Amino acid sequence: MSFDKSESDLWIGSRWIEDLIPQIEQYIAIPALSPAFDPDWATTGHIDAAVQFVHTWITSRPVAGMTVSIQELPGLTPLIVAEVEPFGNVSDSETTTILYGHLDKQPEMEGWRPDLGPWTPVRQGDRLYGRGGADDGYAAFASLTALEAVQRSGGSHGRCVILIEASEESGSPDLPAHIDALAERLGNVGLVVCLDSGCATYDTLWLTTSLRGLVDGTLDISIVTEGVHSGSASGVVPSTFRIARQLMDRIEDSSTGAVLIEAANVTIPSHRIQEARATATLLGDAPEAMPFVESAFPTVEDPVEALLATTWKPALSTIGVDGMPSIEAAGNVLRPRTALKLSLRIPPTANPTQVEQELREVLEKDPPYGASVVFSDSGGAGGWNAPDLAPWLRDALEAASTAQFGKSVQLFGEGGTIPFMGMLGEKFPRAQFVITGVLGPESNAHGPNEFLDVRYAERLTACLAQVLDSASHATF
């Protein structure tokens, strides 16, 4: 028998309506915050609830040759592991395909529409709203459904291992130990599929070719041991906020946003620049519409430069503040302390360890007015730059995109970070990668009103089934 694409498409469509959407709705309702946002996750129990929920669904599916387990290591979040033996006519039964996703979530965030909420799934047309549906709860359901579709439709697939982790939104700190513990079972990895990325439009298949890295930490500034009446102290005691401004000027040009840390700037490969030009031509003036307030405009308006700014250039964000009372509670007090949580996105090929070291040195050296300045709780995750596509994989992706969307597959870089990709790239340098996802325009992962485009997810699942069948006949 050979893979019947039409039968696969019909079955996948019915599964999304009858099973996957209801399952993802139940998953959305679980407030499974990542460990960085719920340090007591083991006691809270939401991570375990999400793991058990997804594990139960996976074990309920009639996939031939599948064994499912939950790998638990002391002090770490659990990992769901589903191993599926080769099926059908396979040219290489020894090479492993990894299908990756995660089920931990970002915090609630403010600004949800009155009729929506982070833990309340709401279906409106093709949009399924709620935290984690698109980032990345659907991945486990889509990955296994694609494998099941191949088996039901007369196709073939090689040895596959589905990995669903629970610490990705914290930078995947638990994953290296899990991967080391799985080394023998993973074997020779020839293909990695990750559904945790995005798409620039919803009308074709998009393949992610690069991901930025991330370095974050807390800049903590103290000048006096307690708050002092501002009428007595101001003018003599420098404000910690003014000191913070001076220190921030060391690492970022406030007028342009240019990051001044040398290790965070790299030479952009010429083929990635060409790729950005092609994507900008396809998308037009705006790669993705941002919810600017009236009269506001972006830092970079040229479409090509905008794409490169979000994929191959560093960018600094201040994502949290301590030491400042709310406006309602603010008294006339010169505050003793200001602490800023800094998040620095770095280019795919920048070294996060070097960036973190330089950032700390620049911020802590010669503190203004002798203030106490500490850059702490810092960490980094490397970016990822995809290897060239093997001819068989390029052909498979092109065929899948054409079949599902009537358009060619498109390549583009992403501004986010998936630490797992860099880790696997180092461990399996000969592996091929299919990094894609449903995070398209307005989907707003990490923010309010996050949604999963159900129709796009369905088509993406069908594309994955077709690629898995093609991979079974490939020579790695």
Image: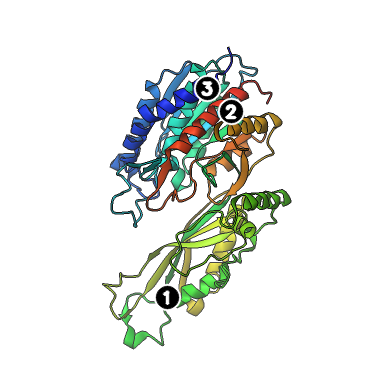
Up-down: is 139 above or below 285? above
- Location of mark 1 (residue): 240
Q: Earlier in the sequence, mark 3 or mark 1?
A: 3
Q: Quadrant of the N terminus?
A: top right
- Location of mark 3 (residue): 6
Q: Residues within 10 Å of mark 2 (few under 14, many from 20)?
A: many
Image quarter for residue 347? Answer: bottom right
Q: Picture coordinates of residue 55 (x, y %)?
A: 38, 28
Q: Residues within 10 Å of mark 3 (few under 14, many from 20)?
A: few
Left or right of 163, for residue 304: right
- Residue drawn at x 35%, y 26% as measured from the top left: 56
User: Given the current orientation, which residue lies at the most extreme left position?
Assistant: 329
Q: Earlier in the sequence, mark 3 or mark 2?
A: 3
Q: Nearer the viewer, residue 79 or 469?
A: 469
Inspect the image, locate mark 1, and give the three-letter code of the amino acid beneath it.
Thr
Distance (Cα) linking label 3 and label 2: 14 Å
Inspect the image, locate mark 3, and give the three-letter code of the amino acid beneath it.
Ser
Left or right of 175, for residue 1: right
Q: Which mark is residue 467?
A: 2
Inspect the image, locate mark 2, and give the three-letter code of the amino acid beneath it.
Val
Residue 419 seen from this side: yes
